[in-house]
Amino acid sequence: MGSRRLLSDAVVGSEEDRVPSAAACMSVAGLLGVAAALVDGRPRGLPRLSRAGAAAVVGTLCARGGLGLAGRTDVLSPRSASERFRRNDRRIYSPLCLTLAALAAPAALGR
């Protein structure tokens, strides 16, 4: 990106130097790992739990994707308002969230 300010603008939506901390990034990575496990049907011995978890994953991804396409990611993340971020959000981030939600939906339905 060339600078932390440009990186922050592209992925956070703020031109201030607000790149997430390593701890925040690791937390998100951990939550994505849990989401992947739920969509994969884990824990195997508790299928209702895995379906409910997968449904929560689908709902979360749909909400994030829908708000992003509507240009309202700032509802979830109040400082995500820069024009560059909104453009990336509509073109890349939100469609990716909606695609992941569609791919995870069968797990929520028990298929």
Image (spheres, rainbow, N blue to C red):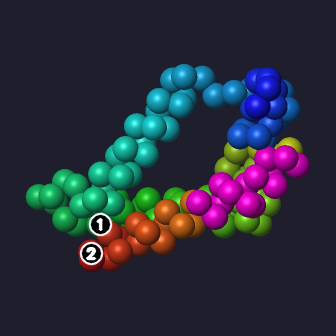
Asked whether the viewer can see residue 63, the reply is no
Residue 28 pos. (x, y %) = 49, 38
Residue 97, image x and y in percent?
57, 60
Q: Tell me: 19 left or right of 41.
A: right
Q: Amino acid at mark 2?
A: Gly
Q: Position of residue 109 (x, y in %)?
A: 33, 76
Q: In which quadrant of the rendered view does residue 105 lie?
A: bottom left
**First reached walking from the N terminus: tag 2 or tag 1:** 1
Numbered label attached to residue 34: none
Which residue bears the numbered disc 2? 110
Q: Give the amino acid type for the residue marked by disc 1 in the picture.
A: Arg
* Crowdedness near tag 2: few (<14), some (14–19) or many (≥20) residues, C-alpha within 10 Å: some
Q: What distance separates the C-alpha of mark 2 from that of mark 1? A: 6 Å
Which residue shows up at 54% across the image and 67% down it? Answer: 99
Q: Residue at x 69, y 27 (%)?
A: 19
- Stretch of the chain drawn in magenta: 83-96
Count residues near mark 1 (Cα–Cα under 10 Å), then give few for <14, some for 14-19, many for 20+.
Answer: many
Which image quadrant for residue 38? Answer: bottom left
Which quarter of the image is occupied by the N terminus?
Answer: top right
Q: Nearer the viewer, residue 36 or 58?
A: 36
**Could you say where residue 58 lies in the image, as x and y percent from the top left?**
46, 65
Q: Secondary structure at mark 2?
A: loop
Instruction: Point out which mark residue 51 bears.
Output: 1
User: In the rendered image of this protein, does residue 15 appear above or below residue 71?
Assistant: above
Look at 48% across and 72% down and name the residue there: 102
